[in-house]
Image (cartoon, rainbow, N blue to C red):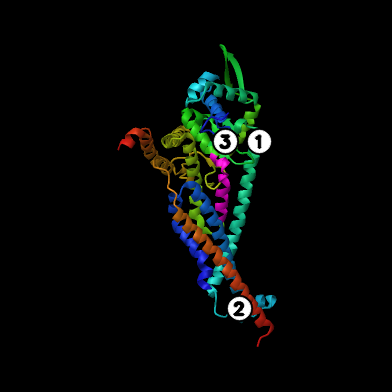
Amino acid sequence: MSWVMWSPLAVSGLFWATAGPVGRRLPPSTAVRVLTVAMVITALATGFVLGVAALLVVGQAPPVAAVGEWSAAALAAGAPVPLAAGCLASAAVGVLGVATVRRAARTGRELRVAARACRSLGPAIAGLVVVDDDTPEAYALPGITGRVVVSTAMLRALPAAERRVLLAHEAAHLRHRHHLYVQIAELAAAADPLLRPAARAVRRGVERWADEVAAEQVGDRHLTARALAHAALARAAAGRTAPGPVLALPGVEGDLVERTRALLAAPARRRPLLAAAIAGLILLTGTAATVTARSTEDRFETAQIAYADPS
Amino acid sequence: MPTIGRRKGALEQEVLAALAAAGRPLTAAEVLADLGDGLAYTTVMTTLSRLYAKGGLTREHSGRAYAYSLRGDAASVGASVTAHRMRRLLEAGDDRAGVLARFVADLPPEDEQLLADLLAAASRPQEQADR
């Protein structure tokens, strides 16, 4: 049972090592979808097996065994979980549980703020809000209908064809509900920190996805790349003249060089084998969790029988 | 009628963006000249009329045509405040996992030259294809 039980952790570790490259290899829309599903299932399975490991060790404590009416000795028989591993798992379950709840609360808070902002922006014509501002800025604000907010400085910095790229990019974020993928991935990464690189890959992936949608709509990858570069350079130029310190964050969505390069190259090929391999891993973790559930149930049942009839 | 290659509402956004970028009233012909891209004059005209009907634009006579500009009324002041609040949220710094999706984030200084080079490459598609 042991290796089956720990396999979700092994899969988490595999994602830690490979999520970045995998996210870059697959076409962005596939990468985001596949990684998000894989992350949710892996996080759930990992949380579950850690919980089981904790339970198997905590259940051996005499007071707990007495309350549960099972035999501590029978539960410990064959040492399914080493004591140290069980204690570590207990601590991890506690810490990660708190982190997950806090992350969920934060997501809820941010979505509420965004929805409120959408409402206070009023009935924007065609879903576009133009803000009179000297800093080049553009973003999508998710909500029931969502808004695209663009500053006049950004619009002035780009010729019409590149403005079209920008608008298509932001509309793609809203239409494909990219914020949900990002938030779900963040939640999974809070529950299972080994999935942190995968969450970054999802965040990067939604930007690439929107870039690809925009490129397809304007029918010109080079034009799309130029729009990105012009917008970024306009922002950088405004940042130099702006009063006060401007923090240059190498944000994940700020992998502009990478995004531009990807647009200048040919679109990513579909890779059915890679996608199938990830699907296989997801299946493995799901199965491992199910098998663990079944065998743990059996173990507790045996321990309860041993408690009732200690012969 | 949406132009081929554009989704519903996309052209309306582009027309609004063109007017905002110009910063002065534009006639349908001027909008068409800015957008280019094989659009028909009647398509631009229809879009402008529709945006005007929705209350997004104001218009004035300019010779025999109308010149349109974005409506900058009280509603957009509220929008401006909200947008500034959003920007502060964006610039809070640690929040890389927020719900807002920015087109471009701040550029690390070392990436600026790299990006400028890529831009130069992107502006010479022919040359690249020849190589």
Query: Which chain does tag 1 point to?
Result: A
Q: Amino acid at mark 2?
A: Leu
Q: Amino acid at mark 1?
A: Ser
Q: Which residue is mark 3?
A: A148
| Residues packed near mark 2 inside 10 Å, few (<14), some (14 to 19) or many (20 plus) | many
Which image quarter: residue A88? bottom right
What is the x, y in percent for residue A78? 55, 80
Say which element carries label 2.
Answer: helix
Q: Disc 1 to disc 3, how far (Cα)? A: 14 Å
- Mark closer to the observer (1, 3): 3
Residue nearest the viewer, comparing A138 with A78: A78
* CB contact under 8 Å: marks 3 and 2: no
Which residue is located at x 66 percent, y 81 percent?
A305
Q: Which residue is mark 2?
A: A75
Q: Is residue A106 above or below residue B27?
A: below
Please name the predominant secondary structure of the magenta segment in the image.
helix
Which residue is located at x 61 percent, y 33 percent?
B81
What is the x, y in percent for residue A127? 60, 34
Q: Disc 3 to disc 2, how far (Cα)? A: 58 Å
Q: Is residue A141 above or below residue A33?
A: above
- Mark closer to the observer (2, 1): 2
Tell me the magenta residue range. A172-189
| Residues packed near mark 3 inside 10 Å, few (<14), some (14 to 19) or many (20 plus) | many
Q: Which residue is mark 1?
A: A120
Q: Amino acid at mark 3?
A: Val
Q: Is residue B38 above or below residue A50?
A: above
Which residue of the protein is positioned furthest toward the top in this rendering? Answer: B63
